[in-house]
Amino acid sequence: MRTMTLLTCGVDEAGRGPWAGPVTAGAVVLDPARPIEGLTDSKALKESQRDALAPLIRERAAAFCVAHASVEEIDRLNIREATFLAMSRAIEGIARQCPLGMILIDGNALPKDLPCEARAIIKGDLTEPAISAASILAKTERDALMKDMDAVHPGYGFARHKGYGTAAHAEALQRLGPCVHHRTSFRPIRELIASRAAQVTR
């Protein structure tokens, strides 16, 4: 009787902290026969390095999936639960492609109802190549979405800061007000909306 090989999946997210855009999760099962040099935490890499590694991961991985939780889901659920939702969606995408025996997730907590045994690893994106690969896919996919968003909503600088709370982003918000892609549950956006509403009613 042939024994089914259960595989290990690495999972990481990008976009928990920004004021705008979705939160994105990557899930990757690496192929030991097709190694990828240079995998590490996406934040430790230059954009050009991430952009070079992402297609290699997609080409050489045994399986991969990238998934999102929308701004609406972030505002409705909170960022922690929306991150877990994006991770669960990415894991479900992997589970449809291959049999999983272990899931390694960057961080200190796990989503509920995972399809197999799972372990949270603090700074796992630095120590587990599959998590590193997932981190790179999540980051590059989300960055591409933010660049597309910049073309539709110019003026905020999404292509540069990717929705993070930079001084330039704060200045653009004061000038333009929030757009549909801003997370209204995040304090800077919530307070700006309240301030503008108060000015209108005066």
Image (cartoon, rainbow, N blue to C red):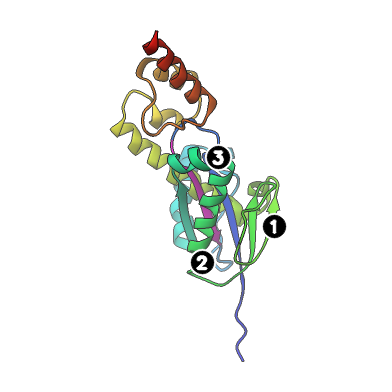
Question: Earlier along the polypeptide chain: callout 1 or callout 3?
Answer: 3
- CA gap between label 3 and label 2 equals 32 Å
For label 2, the crowd category at 10 Å Cα-Cα, with few meaning under 14, some 14 to 19 and many 20 or more, is some
Q: Residue furthest left?
A: 152
| 48 lies above or below 176 | below
Residue drawn 54% across and 60% down? 91
Which residue position holds label 2?
62
Percent of width and height locating residue 144 = 39, 42
* Magenta residue span: 21-29
| 149 lies above or below 173 | below
Q: Residue furthest bottom?
A: 1
Which residue position holds label 3?
78
Percent of width and height locating residue 149 = 34, 36
Q: Amino acid at mark 3?
A: Asn
Question: Earlier along the polypeptide chain: callout 2 or callout 1?
Answer: 2
Which residue position holds label 1?
119
| 69 lies above or below 165 | below
